[in-house]
Each structure stands twice: as C-alpha cells, then as structure tokens.
Image: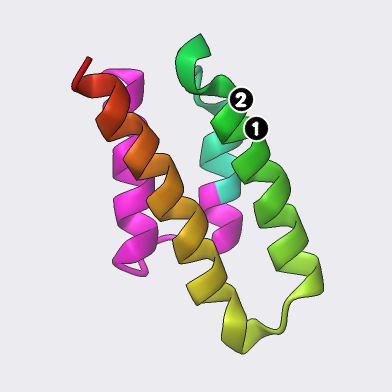
C-alpha cells in the first residue's frame, strides 16, 4: 500500500467513524507523505488540533469531515496527473 492509499484509507476510516479525530491526527503525523501533499497534510494536522481542543464535541465530526474531504480532493488531483 503506497502512501496515497494509506492516506485515503485513514480518511475513509474517519468517514466511516472507525477512526476518531485523535486516530486520524496520529495517522497523519506518522505517514511519510509525498512532498506534493506534505503541506496540505501538515495544515490538516494543525486544523485537527484546533478542532479537537476548540470545537464542541457535537460539531467536531462535521468540521473534521471538511478537512478529510480537502485531503481526499488533493490526493485525487495528484493521482490524476
């Protein structure tokens, strides 16, 4: 499984509620993502930390879902090049 697939897998697990925000954040931090998406993943990690600590529990899933969709969109764009 390449790094893009691992990234997509982690995002999908969050969408399916198999991963918590903490699980997703931890996975993003240890993945060795390609340089083309590294900036996006780093920004996502920072956003996830903000969501975890500054957003009420009942709003966290939807806000994190926006982050996940953004990552998946970028991965799809890079895979189609």
Instruction: Please name the residue shown 56% across and 32% down the image.
Output: 40
| SS majority, magenta | helix
Give coordinates of residue 7: x percent, y percent: 38, 35
Q: How far apart are marks 1 and 2 (CA)?
A: 5 Å
Q: In the drawing, does residue 5 fall left or right of residue 37?
A: left
> What residue is shown with label 1?
42
**At 61% from the left edge and 57% from the top edge, which residue is drawn?**
22
Question: Is 80 a magenta residue?
Answer: no
Tell me the crowding category of disc 2: few under 14, some 14 to 19, or many 20 or more residues within 10 angstroms, Cα based: few
Q: Where is residue 27 in the image (x, y as percent from the top left)?
A: 52, 39
Q: In this view, does 2 lie to the left or right of 21?
A: left
53 or 72, which lies in front? 72
Which quarter shows the N terminus?
top left
Q: Position of residue 38 (x, y in %)?
A: 56, 21
At numbered mark 2, what does the secondary structure look like: helix, strand or loop?
helix
Dot 1: within a 10 Å radius of its alpha carbon, few (fewer than 14), some, or many (20 or more) residues?
some
| Residue under the point 56% across and 69% down | 63
Q: Do the residues labelled 1 and 2 touch (CB within 8 Å)?
A: yes
Residue bearing the label numbered 2: 39
Q: Which quadrant does the C terminus fall into?
A: top left
Which residue in the rendered view is the most extreme toward the bottom?
58
Structure colour scheme: rainbow
Residue 79 visible? yes
- Whether residue 20 is visible to the viewer of this picture, yes or no, is no
Outermost right residue = 54
Q: Does the magenta stretch include residue 20?
A: yes
Q: In terms of secondary structure, where does tag 1 sit? A: helix
Relative vertical location of residue 63 with respect to residue 76 in this rendering, above or below: below
Q: What stretch is highlighted in magenta?
A: 1-24
User: Residue 15: which numbered mark, if any?
Assistant: none
């Amino acid at each position: 499984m390449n790094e893009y697939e691992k990234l997509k897998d982690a995002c999908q697990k969050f969408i399916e509620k198999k991963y918590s925000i903490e699980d997703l954040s931890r996975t993003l931090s240890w993945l060795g993502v390609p340089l083309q998406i590294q900036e996006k993943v780093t920004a996502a990690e920072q956003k996830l930390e903000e969501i975890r600590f500054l957003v009420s529990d009942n709003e966290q899933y939807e806000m994190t879902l926006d982050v996940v969709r953004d990552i998946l969109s970028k991965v799809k764009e890079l895979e189609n090049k």
